[in-house]
Image: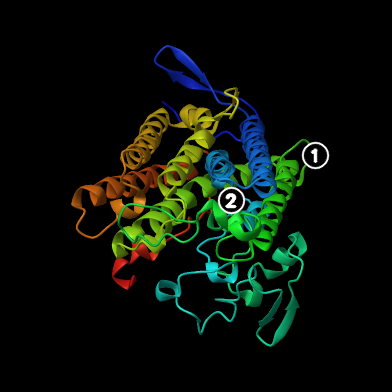
Amino acid sequence: MKIAKILGTAVLVSTLGAQAYAAPAAKDVLTTYADIAHAGYEDSVITAKKLQTAVNTLIADPSATSFDAAKSAWLAARAPYQQTEVYRFGNAIVDDWEGKVNAWPLDEGLIDYVETDLYGEESEENPAYAANVIANPSLSISGETIDASIIDTGLIESLHEIDDVESNVATGYHAIEFLLWGQDLHGTDAGNGDREWTDYAKGDDCTNGNCDRRGAYLKAATDLMVSDLEWMTAQWADGGEARATVLEGDGVPGLTAMVTGMGSLSYGELGGERTKLGLLLHDPEEEHDCFSDNTHNSHYYDALGIQNVYLGRYTRVDGSVVEGASLSDLVAANDAALDTELRGKLASSVLAGKAMVTRAEGGEAFDQLIAMGNDDGNAVVQTFVDALVDQTKSIEQIIAAVGIDGIEFEGSDSLDNPTAVN
């Protein structure tokens, strides 16, 4: 078959057997890409608002039941958000914003009490390492006195990455996760964070002190995350800046963003920093959702998000489907074999991610899977890494197939130079 590179309008390429093949216009492919982004962020808002309701109920009427409901709502909120992460690396507007809602790892001693035997009491790299906002209405950080008497969205925004220390994560999913689960002190043994609902109890039932301030922090973090997600959703709506940016011009910038996001998340970020690094070090501190032991789901939904973008199809939290002209269609019109190959590899990485989910649902969470001496568990995680690396090789070939160039994917020492990892 003669290959035709198509960007602007749908044109007919030569027959494959007796069947003519038509390529979609780049603008149609990018419209689907923007539609899926909008739906994914909107679903993130919907589920974050359910979390917000659960948090408000917990604060108003603390109990084991309301506490468990808030944790369940947090877990549900992760699923749609993780599927949007594929939009991060190719879209500056997302990458510049993403740290507000999904930054990790975090020095949790900035926020609340910690077990100092494991965590320590100070860090040369981070003056706010053990500031404990919840326990201290006045903070002294790097010689600056901060009034923390009222915990609200303004305060925690001002503390996020204070002193330009990236691990000073004061906002977003993982700050909320810590406030709901607490530290995971089990290492690579079974078990997640052991925080009790009584950390939010009223009066004499309060454990670990400052329950009212802890509730105020949890509420502020949740309210702020809802607001941040609403802002990003608007950027992908009709007239939004993110949608306008990917649709402008001849389609090359938008397609570049798509492929960059797929390749960088697949290789350097998910395959390397979020998965292979923890496996190399056998370190539970390197798991993404470390307090809740939800890392298996986060990794699975990241992989699913990459597949969504390529296939131009996303299933919403209400079961409805957003779909349209896809990158897969465009690649198939130029190189049908490559499209078939990449579809298969994406399915394999999603399946490998699902295998981790199945193990976790059977009682073996990600931090156990990566434990030293767990050869079976290590192999399950390595299969996921291998699938991501393999699919990235095919994602690289998209660059030539659709006539774009100048793309570099995020790398990772964990994959590129593992001997440098320690």
Indicate left or right for 149 with 381 as reference. right
Q: Is 413 on the left-hand or right-hand side of 168?
A: left
Colour setting: rainbow
Q: Where is residue 252 in the image (x, y as percent from the top left)?
A: 62, 44
Answer few, some or many: residues within 10 Å of disc 2's Cα (few below 14, many 20 plus, some between 14 and 19): many
Is residue 241 something that shows in the picture? Answer: yes
First along the sequence among labels 2 and 1: 2
Q: Residues within 10 Å of mark 1 (few under 14, many from 20)?
A: few
On screen, residue 24 above or below 191: above
Distance CA(mark 2)–CA(mark 1) = 20 Å
Would residue 365 be found to the left or right of residue 235 on screen?
A: left
Amino acid type, mark 1:
Gly
x and y percentages locating residue 237 in the rendered image: 74, 37
Report the residue marked by disc 2: 88
**Location of the C terminus (image quadrant):** bottom left
Residue at the (30%, 49%) spot, across then down: 381
Q: Name the residue under label 1.
A: 239
Question: Which residue is at a point 45% across and 75% down the rendered structure image?
Answer: 116
Q: Residue at x 63, y 64 (%)?
A: 170
Q: Relative to 102, say whether 247 is above or below.
A: above
- Please say if the residues under marks 2 and 1 sit with CB atoms less than 8 Å apart: no
> Which image quadrant is residue 209 in?
bottom right
Residue 310 placement, left or right of 375: right
Q: What residue type is labelled 2?
A: Arg
- Which quarter shows the N terminus? top left
Q: In the orientation shown, which residue stands out farthest toward the top?
A: 18
> Which sits in the foreground, 155 or 299?
155
Instruction: Identify the disc placed on residue 354.
Output: none
Where residue 264 sits in the image (x, y, percent)? 48, 52
Is there any visible trace of residue 404 in the rendered image? Answer: no
